[in-house]
Image (cartoon, rainbow, N blue to C red):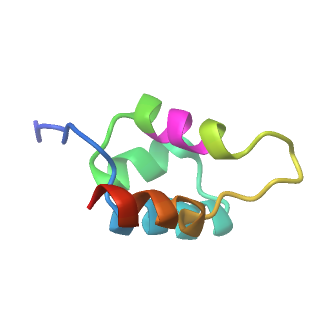
Amino acid sequence: MVRKKTGRLTLKERIQIETLLTEKKNKSYIAITINRARSTVTREVNKWVQTDRDKYSAECRLPLFRTVS
């Protein structure tokens, strides 16, 4: 069994989430693809998508990456 990563999501992982959501992949598939827990992916998406019309965007986190990194 491959050990799951811990810690913060990277920008690359967030871009993968965005791309896979655009391709209509489910959160379980995305979690397996980026080697993260399904709950991590779900929390990340739910944090930034409040309504059905909202679209997840990795760029919404860019200002935070610039201040933290």
Residue 42 in magenta? yes
The furthest residue to the right: 53
Count of marks, rendered view:
0
Please say if 5 is above or below 58: above
Q: Position of residue 19 (x, y in %)?
A: 55, 70
Residue appearing at x 31%, y 42% in the figure: 36
Residue 6 image offset from top left, x and y in percent: 20, 37
Asked if residue 51 is positioned above or below residue 56 in the image, the reply reads above
Give whichever of 17, 64 is nearer the camera.
64
Residue 50 vs residue 9: left or right?
A: right
Name the residue rendered at 38%, 67% in the picture: 66
Left or right: residue 3 versus residue 8 is left
**Residue 24 forms part of the magenta stretch:** no
The overriding secondary structure of the stretch rendered in magenta is helix
Give the camera-side residue of 62 and 47: 62
Residue 14 picture quarter: bottom left
Q: Residue at x 65, y 46 (%)?
A: 48
Location of residue 62 in the rendering, given as x and y in whole percent from the top left corner = 49, 66
Q: Residue at x 42, y 35 (%)?
A: 40
Q: Which residues are magenta?
A: 41-45
The quadrant holding residue 64 is bottom left
